[in-house]
Image: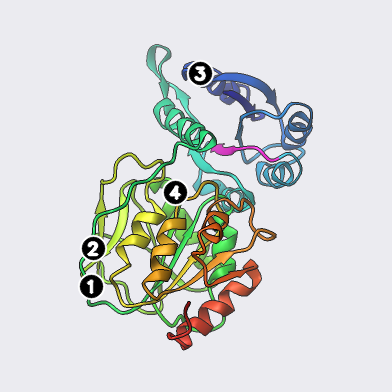
Amino acid sequence: MRVAIVNDLKLAVEVLRQSVLRIPGAEVAWIAEDGRQAIECCARDRPDLVLMDMQMPVMDGAVATREIMRNTPCPIIVVTASIQANLDRVYDALGAGALDVTTTPSFGPAGAIEGLESLARKIDHVRQLERGHAVREPGPDRTKSPSGGIIAIGASTGGPHALAAALPRGKELQAPVVIVQHIDRAFAPGLAEWLARETGHTVVIAHEGQVPTTGTVYVACSNDHLVLERGRFEHRAEPRHLAHRPSVDVFFESLVRQPCGVAVLLTGMGRDGAEGLRALRRAGWHTIAQDQATSVVWGMPGAAVALDAAVEVLPIQRIAQAIELACAAPGRTR
């Protein structure tokens, strides 16, 4: 796997270079000192993965990510010294198509690299996605829950901006909203904060034992899978083999025996959520998939469309209204 490094700090470049060399099967493709150089390097020599810093001279990492994904798309992981200090840039980059985010490793005692394990895990995750190893197995049967219908949304690559656009604005939500976005648990609170600021809604982290209530948006925040059981959130380690944790499919499947609601599958690499969306449609839910033209990556919603899992296939600009209409007319399915 050829990995490119984009960072203007010599020490950060060196620790990232050594980190890549310590990961089996990985090598450094090239190094760029700013976003503009990264765009030019990608155009000449597209790598298997880009490790993108956020704060750089000439052009920052969020703008560079947007340009790379538009012109020479390739997997990008945001690697930055401080997530909180770069919150807006980080979620701009994730919205533009970056796959994941992590903090920059650092040198520890005796040449050890602190943070290498996290970076290696994320690089391996990208490798699995690229090779198509994110295979799922059917989840266990779920018992019926007394809770009312919810709005369930799954997203991955390019998800943050799509999520912000898909949440109805200017009026109160008509049901609880539960989001499963492929993101490390360490960064889910930042996503919730960003979404709250972008949409004006109350956005919180989904905690074990919580009962989702109307008017609140809940974001999955665990490296285990989020499910809804007997009207409350639970986290489960199984199935352990899935590349995505939390998995959209696992969450959607936990809703099959719930009162019918609205399920939405947004932009994302792979196919997580497609089979779960089909199961929800068959159970009477109103299901929506984002269309190809407005998706950063039409993997997940595209797989759902191929399975005939979506009642509606819509551009992102129309999804919020479609959710409102479906909530107002719960019989409007299939």
Task: Tell me the element at label 1.
Answer: loop
- Residue 138 lies left or right of residue 17; in this view the side is left
**Depth-wise, is mark 4 or mark 2 nearer the camera?**
2
> In the rendered image, which quarter contains the N terminus?
top right
Residue 113 position (above or below residue 246): above
* CB-based contact (under 8 Å), mark 4 and mark 2: no
Q: Which residue matches tag 3?
A: 25
Q: Is residue 120 left or right of residue 6?
A: left
Q: CA distance from mark 4 to mark 2?
A: 29 Å
Q: Which amino acid, by three-letter code, is at mark 1?
A: Ser
Q: Is residue 4 magenta?
A: no
Instruction: Please give the range of residues in magenta.
Output: 73-80
Q: Which mark is residue 142?
A: 2
The kind of residue tagged 4 is: Phe
Query: Mark 4 or mark 2, which has the lower sequence index?
Result: 2
Type of the residue with mark 3: Gly
Q: Toward the viewer: 56 or 333?
A: 333
**Residue 95 in the image: x percent, y percent?**
60, 53
